[in-house]
Image: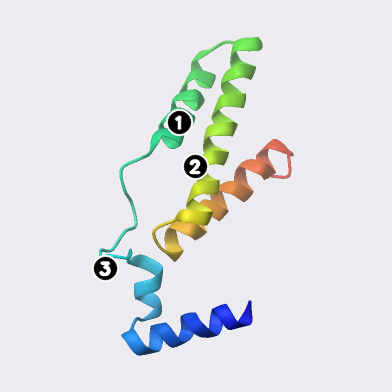
Amino acid sequence: MSSQLNSDAQKMETKGVTLFDRTFRDSEGNIVIAQMPNLPLIVGLGAIILQLILPGGKLQTGADLIAFGALFTWAWQEVFAGANYFRRALGMIVLVGIVALKLNLY
């Protein structure tokens, strides 16, 4: 693990990449903070809206499960395949947040 960190640090020094670049830029050098939502995020937000509209019962429970699954998938993808450190941190925050809400730890 430390050898991977050392090699990453050496790459940063040789390329002149700053922490700002690693945090906010993608592999092509573009600053990426927000981007078009992907399918899991669209499905998750749609299911949350359905939860607000539907009366309590099995339909609302189903929408809740779909919303949790979709948002969990989106957050997991961001943590492990995010374009930069900011996107990965955002994924981790959302992942911890939705799990905490499900466990009623808020």
Mark closest to the chain's N terminus, 3 or 1: 3
Residue 70 drawn at (x, y percent): 53, 33
- Element at label 3: loop
Crowd band around label 1 with a 10 angstrom C-alpha radius: few (<14), some (14–19), many (20+): some
- Give residue 35's position: percent from left, percent from top: 31, 48
Label at residue 91: none
Q: Can you identify the residue that label 1 sits on? A: 45
Q: Compared to 105, does 87 lie above or below? A: below
- Residue that badge 3 annotates: 29
The answer to whether 67 is drawn above or below residue 92 in the figure is above
Q: Which residue is mark 2?
A: 74
Tell me what residue is drawn at x 28 percent, y 63 percent: 31
What residue is drawn where x is 49% and y is 24%?
Answer: 47
Element under disc 2: helix
The residue lying at 48 percent from left, 51 percent from top is 78
Q: Is residue 47 above or below residue 10?
A: above
Amino acid, disc 3: Gly
Given contact means CB atoms under 8 Å apart, are the residues at marks 3 and 2 in contact?
A: no
* Quadrant of the frame with the N terminus: bottom right
Query: Which of the 4 image quadrants contains residue 25?
Result: bottom left
| Residue 27 image position (x, y, % from top left) | 32, 65
Q: Earlier in the sequence, mark 2 or mark 1?
A: 1
